[in-house]
Amino acid sequence: MLGEYTAWVAVGVIFFLYGIVIGSFLNVVIFRIPIKENITLTRSHCMTCGYTIAWYDLVPVFSWLFLKGKCRHCGSKISIQYPIIEAANGIIYLIIYLLNDFNNNPVETILYCACASALLALSVIDWRTQEIPFGINIFIFILGLIRLLTDLGNWSEYVIGFCAVSGFLCLLILFGHFILKKEVMGFGDVKLMAATGLLLGWKLIIPAFFIGCILGSVIHLTIMAVKKGTDHVLAFGPYLSMGVFIIMLWGEQLVSWYLKMWTFL
Ligand SMILES: [Zn+2]
């Protein structure tokens, strides 16, 4: 019994540390994709002086703290985004591990971790540039394909998730374009929902989308109120990502709770 518990804790620690290391790579993705710099070939370097960062200064979180957020070479400030994204990704992996049944469904836990990292990166990029990189959507789509291929017994769940969501959102965009005469949503968002629809299946992607819309409207209206109605462009990616993330963690419970509520009425 004790052995089982120790193993459970040990795997949790591994998830956390692995999350931090992947978080370090996410920073590279977040900074380089918008400026179209190669994300694998060039070594990590200072954004100000271009100095190649030594391996001992690349330890996630700790290096930033040790160097007090400054480049060892030129002393210019290193964005606090680095340790924040690293720590956040570690915590996200740990939460997914704690709330998913890793022992019974390790594939799902690992795919969800990978997807959460992609969501984190695209949220930051979308927030800054109003654009979701196509490569990240493709990455989530590949995760969805892996899910489909490893769970062929439920193939229709995932295929319907993909088709229904992309169909519905394309209609929504056409409706907005021709009837409301405004852009209700970008195609980057549609691709994101289609890819996550393939990964989660239709039963979970529908509530994920609605949670994203609710969060988006509430937070957006709050920002508008605080900033006194400056027309801040709404980046939808971060909210849709939050919806997907919440559903990855509590989807089954939320759906059964929702269905029960209707049977009571
Ligand atoms: Zn420097």
Image (cartoon, rainbow, N blue to C red):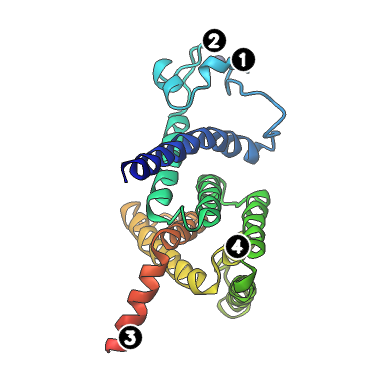
Mark identifier at residue 51:
1
- Residue 102 in percent (x, y) is at 46, 53
- Residue 182 in percent (x, y) is at 57, 70
Q: Residue at x 63, y 16 (%)?
A: 52
Report if the beta carbon of the residue with label 2 is closer than 8 angstroms to ligand 1. Answer: yes
In the shown orientation, is residue 80 left or right of residue 265? right
Q: Crowdedness of circle 3 by 10 Å Cα count: few (<14), some, many (20+)?
A: few
Q: Amino acid at mark 1?
A: Tyr
Between label 1 and label 4, give the one nearer the viewer.
1
Q: Residue at x 63, y 50 (%)?
A: 136
- The local secondary structure at tag 2 comes to loop
Are the two marked residues, 2 and 3, in contact with CB atoms closer than 8 angstroms? no
- The local secondary structure at tag 1 comes to loop
Q: Where does label 2 land, which residue?
A: 73
Q: Amino acid at mark 4?
A: Gly
> What is the distance, in whole Å, between disc 2 and disc 4 at their CAs?
42 Å
Report if the beta carbon of the residue with label 4 is closer than 8 angstroms to ligand 1. Answer: no
- Residue 257 in percent (x, y) is at 33, 75
Report if the beta carbon of the residue with label 1 is closer than 8 angstroms to ligand 1. Answer: yes
Which tag, 2 or 1, sits closer to the chain's start?
1
Q: Where does label 4 land, which residue?
A: 186
> What is the distance, in whole Å, between disc 1 and disc 4 at their CAs?
38 Å
In which quadrant will I find the C terminus?
A: bottom left
Q: Where does label 3 land, which residue?
A: 262
Q: Is residue 227 above or below residue 71?
A: below
Q: Crowdedness of circle 4 by 10 Å Cα count: few (<14), some, many (20+)?
A: some
